[in-house]
Image: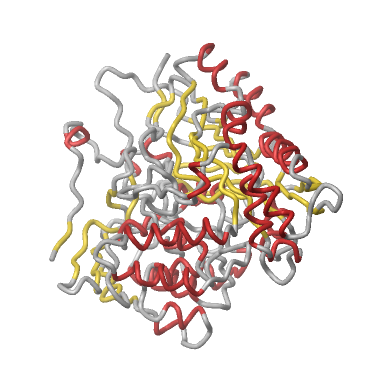
Amino acid sequence: MKKTLLLSSCLALLLAAPAYAANPEPDETLADDQSLSYWLLDSIKTKDPQLNSTIQGSHVARQLFEGLYSQDNAGDLVPGVATDYDVSDDQTVYTFHLRPDAKWSNGDPVTAGDFVFAWQRLADPATGSTYAWYEELMNVKNAASIIAGDTDPSELGVKAVDDHTLEVTLESPIPFFVKMLTHTSTFPVNQAVVEEYGDQWTLPENMVGNGAYKLVEDKLGQDLTLERNENYWDNDNTVIDSIHFQAINDKNAALTRYLAGELDYIELPSGQFPRLKEEYPEQTHAVPRSCTYAYLFNLSDKGPEALKDVRVRKALSYALNRDIIVNNITRSGEKPAYSWTYYATADFEPPVTDYSEWSQQERNEKAVELLKEAGYDKSNPLELTLSYNTSDDHKKIAIAAQQFWKAIGVNVTLNNTEWKVYLDNLKNYNFDIGRYAWCGDYDEASTYLDYFRSGGMNYGGFDDPDYDAVMKASLTAEDPSADYDKAEQILAEEMPLAPIYFYSTPVMVPADLKGLPVENVLQNWYAKDLYRVAN
C-alpha cells in the first residue's frame, strides 16, 4: 500500500517551486538582504537531535537537520528526506523511500543507514537521551526493552534495505506514526562525524548536518549563526541566506531590540498584545500554539511530604484563578485550562472536569476545606517553594499564584533560576512546585497524555498503574477518544499538575518577512520556507 503526500490545492497552484519551499507571490520582489534574526527565550543547551529536549533547541535543529518528513505552514506533512512510503497490510511495517539527492553538508550522501544509526542511538541507554521514551511511544519494535537496557540497540526494528530504502517495524499499529516523524529526535546524524568527535561533534568546526543550513558560529548557545548549506537537496529553492539566533531572557528587552530593527521575530511580554496590535497592526499577530502552561507538583521521593496528599494538590490547583491570569496578566487570547491536552488538538474532544464547572468562589471554598482535612489552615500554614525559570512573564504569574495561595493559608516562597539550572533541577527533582509548559510533538492527543506515563519525561514523578493501563489500551483502540477522556479524568482526580492556560502566542514579525506559519498549531517552522520582500 503506497502513501504519497498530496500537495494542498492552493500551494499546488504555485508553479515552479515545491510546496515546501519559499514561494514568493508573482507580484512580490525579493529584498537584497535575505538574512533572518530570530529571538530565543533561552540559550541552546545542545544542538544534538537525539539529546535536545527543548523548544528552543528544536527551532535550531530544524534548520540544521531534516527528518523523513516536514510540515507546511498549515501543519500538513510534506516530504523531507523521504519522498513517500509503503505500509504493510497489517500496518506494522513502513518502508520509506529516500530521495537520492539528499546530502550532508560535507557532500556525503544521506542514507538509510544514517537514520538507523540515529534511531538506535536515541534508544541506547548509553546515549542518555531524555527523549528515548519518544521512540517507545512511536511503538518501534524492541524500543522499550532497549531503553530498559535488556536488549542490544542493534535489535531495534529499523533497518536499511539499501542506501535509499528504510524499513521500520512497529510492535503494533498506531494510526499517527508518520505524524511523529517530524520530531527532531528522529532526525538522522552522520555516524562517522559523531564517532570521530564524540561530544564535540556539534561544535561549528566539526558539525555536519543535512538541513538547509549549516552552523558557522556558536557563542555558548546564546548567539548562533547559520548559513545556507549549498549541499542541501533543495538549495536552489531556498531564499533566506543566513540566520542569527539570539537568546534574550527578558521579553521586554527583546521587544526594545525588535522595535530598533535588531530582531525579526519575538514573542511579546505579557499584557502587551492589545497595545502593540493597535500601534503595529501589520506586524502583531496572535497565533495558535499547541502548548499548555502548568505547575508541576514534585511527587518523587525527593518532593515535600505535603504534596503526596492529593487533597493538598487539588487545593493548590483549585485556588489558582485562571481567569485573572489570562485576562489581566497574559492578555493575548489564552484560554483558561482545567485539563492537560491542548483544546485545539486534531480529532480531540476536550474533557469536562468537575472543577472546571465551578465558580472561582466554589473552587476557593473547596480548597480551604481540603487543606483543613489535610491538617493545614492559616494558623498552621503549609510552606512550599514555587520555582520558575527567568522570565518577567513567569514572574508575574508566580507572584499572582503566591497571592492566590496565601488567601487559602499556603505560604509560598518564589525561586527563580536561569533556564539551564532550572531544567537540571526539574530532571533531578530538585523542586516543590515547578513552572512548566508542554508543547505538542505532533498533532494528536497522545503527545500530551503520554507525558504522564510511568517512564515518560514526567518530571513530577507521577506513577499511576491505572493511568498507564488506559494509555496502553489507547494504542490499540480503533477510536482512542474514550481512553483519552479517562486519562484526563485521572489527571483531574490525582492532580499531578495544575493546568493554568492554553497558549495563544502573541508575536511581532516585520511586514517584509513572509512564510512564517500562522495555522500550524505546533508552530514548527523552517527558514527554507521564508523570504523577505522589498519594501
Reply above or below: 273 against 295: above
* Pick the front one: 133 or 86: 133
- Placement of the N terminus among the 4 image quadrants: bottom left
Res 107 → quadrant: bottom left
Say which residue appears at 83% left-offset and 51% top-offset.
Answer: 381
The colour scheme is: secondary structure
The percent position of residue 434, horizontal first and vertical second, equals 68, 52
The percent position of residue 24, horizontal first and vertical second, equals 30, 27
Q: How many marks?
A: 0
Horizontal side, residue 212 vs residue 149: left or right: left
* Pick the front one: 255 or 365: 365
* Pick the front one: 225 or 431: 431
Horizontal side, residue 132 vs residue 2: left or right: right
The percent position of residue 267, horizontal first and vertical second, equals 56, 32
Reply above or below: 437 against 480: above
Horizontal side, residue 392 vs residue 47: left or right: right
Say which residue appears at 57% left-offset and 71% top-offset.
Answer: 463
Say which residue appears at 63% left-offset and 25% top-offset.
Answer: 255
Residue most toward the right?
379
- Placement of the C terminus among the 4 image quadrants: top left
Horizontal side, residue 70 vs residue 17: left or right: right
Res 162 → quadrant: bottom left
Reply above or below: 167 against 281: below
The percent position of residue 79, horizontal first and vertical second, equals 27, 52
Residue most toward the top?
279
Say which residue appears at 47% left-offset and 50% top-offset.
Answer: 353
